């Protein structure tokens, strides 16, 4: 794939579409390609953490540092694959897999009480105390059938969040 939107071939579009399980239309992929190369200021073929932080909505996200670990130095194909979890066409399981990766910051396939507490802290900031956070999380886990000592797997996340009517969508503007 080239370094400008005019160099995206039909073959490239179809390859990216297949890579992201056809969750984006061809027109959306072309729009994402244009946006990708606006962010890739030095035309390196990947987006760095600094370039992603230039997007105000990304920089303001309380989970931006966790997300950066997942998306730093993505090429276009992987950029689209990452964003596909936010597609309206993505399944709840695909969305939960992304959420699980945000919580599983060390990538060991398990999420501990401490992992969840860190994300909760990122999301709540200084609005509640550490003690209040721990109490809320302990109660939440208890209600879901887990304890403070439990390690949650992806299957546990799917069990807990799978019936929640989870909405996680980003609109891709198409010119």
Image (tube, rainbow, N blue to C red):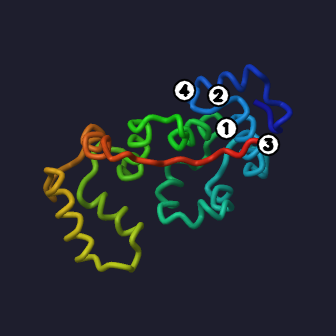
Secondary structure beneath disc 3?
A: loop
Say which residue label 2 marks.
Answer: 16
Characterize the local packing of mark 4: few (<14), some (14-19) or many (20 or more) Cα atoms within 10 angstroms: few
Characterize the local packing of mark 2: few (<14), some (14-19) or many (20 or more) Cα atoms within 10 angstroms: many
Q: Nearer the viewer, residue 129 or 53?
A: 129
Say which residue label 4 marks.
Answer: 21
Secondary structure beneath disc 2?
A: helix
Characterize the local packing of mark 3: few (<14), some (14-19) or many (20 or more) Cα atoms within 10 angstroms: few
What whole-number distance in Å separates the C-alpha atoms at marks 4 and 3?
A: 22 Å
What whole-number distance in Å separates the C-alpha atoms at marks 1 and 4?
A: 15 Å
Residue 66: give x, y in percent of width and height: 46, 57
Q: Which mark is residue 93?
A: none
Q: Which mark is residue 76?
A: 1
Say which residue label 3 marks.
Answer: 175
What whole-number distance in Å separates the C-alpha atoms at marks 2 and 1?
A: 8 Å
- Mark 2 touches mark 1? (CB < 8 Å): yes
Residue 100: give x, y in percent of width and height: 37, 46
Q: Is residue 71 left or right of residue 124?
A: right
Residue shown at the point (61%, 62%) measured from the top left: 57
Q: Nearer the viewer, residue 150 or 133?
A: 133
Camera-nearest label, 1 or 3: 3
> Looking at the image, is mark 4 or mark 2 earlier in the sequence?
2
| 86, above or below 129, in the image | above
What whole-number distance in Å separates the C-alpha atoms at marks 4 and 2?
A: 9 Å
What whole-number distance in Å separates the C-alpha atoms at marks 1 and 3?
A: 19 Å
| 122, above or below 88, in the image | below
In the image as oriented, which residue stretches furthest toward the front? 165
């Amino acid at each position: 794939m080239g370094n400008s939107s005019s160099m995206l071939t039909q073959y490239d579009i179809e390859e990216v579409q297949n890579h992201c399980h056809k969750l984006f239309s061809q027109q959306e992929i072309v729009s994402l390609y244009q946006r990708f190369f606006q962010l890739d200021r030095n035309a390196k073929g990947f987006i760095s953490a600094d370039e992603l932080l230039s997007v105000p909505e990304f920089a303001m996200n309380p989970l931006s540092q966790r997300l950066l670990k997942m998306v730093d130095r993505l090429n276009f194909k992987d950029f689209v694959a990452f964003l596909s979890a936010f597609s309206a066409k993505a399944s709840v399981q695909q969305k939960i897999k992304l959420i699980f990766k945000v919580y599983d910051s060390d990538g060991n396939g398990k999420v501990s009480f401490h992992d969840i507490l860190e994300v909760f802290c990122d999301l709540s900031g200084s609005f509640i105390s550490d003690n209040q956070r721990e109490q809320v999380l302990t109660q939440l886990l208890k209600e879901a059938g887990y304890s403070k000592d439990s390690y949650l797997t992806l299957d546990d996340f799917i069990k807990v969040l799978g019936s929640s009517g989870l909405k996680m969508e980003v609109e891709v503007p198409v010119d």
